[in-house]
Image: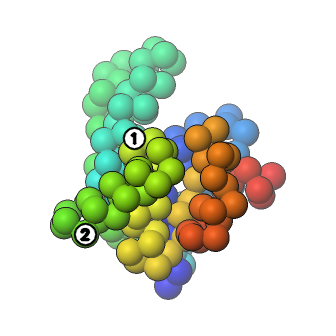
Amino acid sequence: MARAAIDTSVVIEYIDLRGELHEQAEAVFSAALAGRLEILIPHAVLAETFYVATKIYRTLGVERAEAVASKLVEWLYRLPTARVVGEGVQLALEAGGVKLAYNLALTDCYVLAVSKLYGCTAVFKKREREMLRNIGELERNYKLLFLEDYR
C-alpha cells in the first residue's frame, strides 16, 4: 500500500465541499478509504486541523463548532488506513532540523519530517509562500505532491 504524510490544508480542503481543490483532496481520502493509501498524520496536524476547522465552522455559523471539529479529528484518528505519528525524539529532531533549514510553519516541518522518516510523499494543498524560497531544494530532498498541480 502506498503511503502519504498529509498536511492540514489537505484535510480542510477535503471538508470544504466548495474548495477549489476539493476534488483533489477527495481523491486522496477516497484512496485511503478504499485501502489503497495509508495516510500518515503528524500529531501536530490533528491539533491544527481542530483549530482551523473550529474557526471555519464558527464562521459558517455551525452550532457547536468545537464539537463538530472534534468529531472530524476523532474520525481522522480512527480511520483504519490512517496512522497518527508524533512520538519519539527522532521525529522531533527531524522536524526541528527542517525548521532550522527552511524556516517553514512548524506543522509543515512535521509533515516533511514524517515523509523523510517513513519514506513517503508529503501532500500539501499548494506551495506556501515560505516554501517558494527553497522550493528547488525541498523538491530535491523530499517527495512532494501539491494538490494544485492536479487541477
Picture coordinates of residue 48, whole percent (x, y): 37, 39
Q: Residue 150, which numbered label?
A: none
SS of the residue at dot 1? helix
Which amino acid type is marked by label 2? Gln
Instruction: Name the residue that disc number 1 marks.
Output: 49
Q: Nearer the viewer, residue 142 or 101?
A: 101
Q: Nearer the viewer, residue 94 or 15?
A: 94
Mark 2 or mark 1, earlier in chain: 1
Give the residue at the far front of this rendering.
Answer: 101
Q: Residue 90, which numbered label?
A: 2
Picture coordinates of residue 21, whole percent (x, y): 70, 45
Which amino acid type is marked by label 1? Thr
Q: Is residue 89 left or right of residue 8?
A: left
Picture coordinates of residue 60, whole percent (x, y): 51, 18
Q: Give above or below for 12 relative to 2.
A: above
Picture coordinates of residue 121, whole percent (x, y): 55, 70
Q: Is residue 98 visible?
A: yes
SS of the residue at dot 2? helix
Taking the spot 40% from the left edge, 51% from the top edge, the residue there is 100
Taking the spot 55% from the left edge, 49% from the top edge, the residue there is 10
Q: Residues within 10 Å of mark 2 (few under 14, many from 20)?
A: few
* Alpha carbons under labels 2 and 1: distance apart: 23 Å
Q: Is residue 86 left or right of residue 61?
A: left
